[in-house]
Image (tube, rainbow, N blue to C red):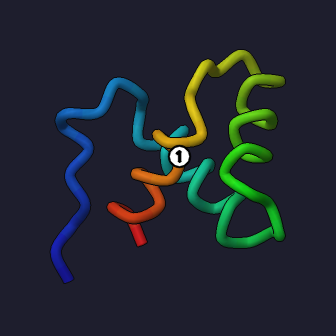
Amino acid sequence: MTPISFKRHRFPPEIIQNAVWLYARFTLSFRDVEDVLAERGIDVSNETVRRWFVTVR
C-alpha cells in the first residue's frame, strides 16, 4: 500500500487524519466535522473535509 502524501496540504497530517476519522467513525456530515474543528480553532470548509476524505480513504 502506498503511503499517503500530505505535501501540498496547508494543515498538518494529524488534523487531516482526525477530520477523516471523525467523519468515518461517527454519523457526522462534512459540515458537522467542520463545526467540530471550528470549536477547536481550526478554520476549514466542509468541502475541504470532503476532499480529504476522498483522498485519504
Residue 36 position in % (x across, y down): 80, 37
Amino acid type for the residue under numbered disc 1:
Val
Q: Residue at x 72, y 32 (%)?
A: 37
Residue 38 found in image quarter: top right
Q: Which residue is disc 1 drawn over?
A: 49
Residue 21: % across, % down: 63, 62
Residue placed most toward the observer, 40 or 32? 32
User: Left or right of 43: which side holds 54?
Assistant: left
Q: What residue is drawn where x is 42% and y is 28%?
A: 11
Q: Identify the image quadrant of the C terminus.
A: bottom left
Residue at figure coordinates x 33%, y 61% from the top left: 55
- Please give left or right for residue 14 compared with residue 22 in the image: left
The answer to whether residue 50 is above or below residue 25 is above
Numbered label tally: 1
Measured along the vertical axis of the image, is residue 14 above or below residue 20? Answer: above
x then y, percent, for residue 3: 21, 66
Element class at badge 1: helix
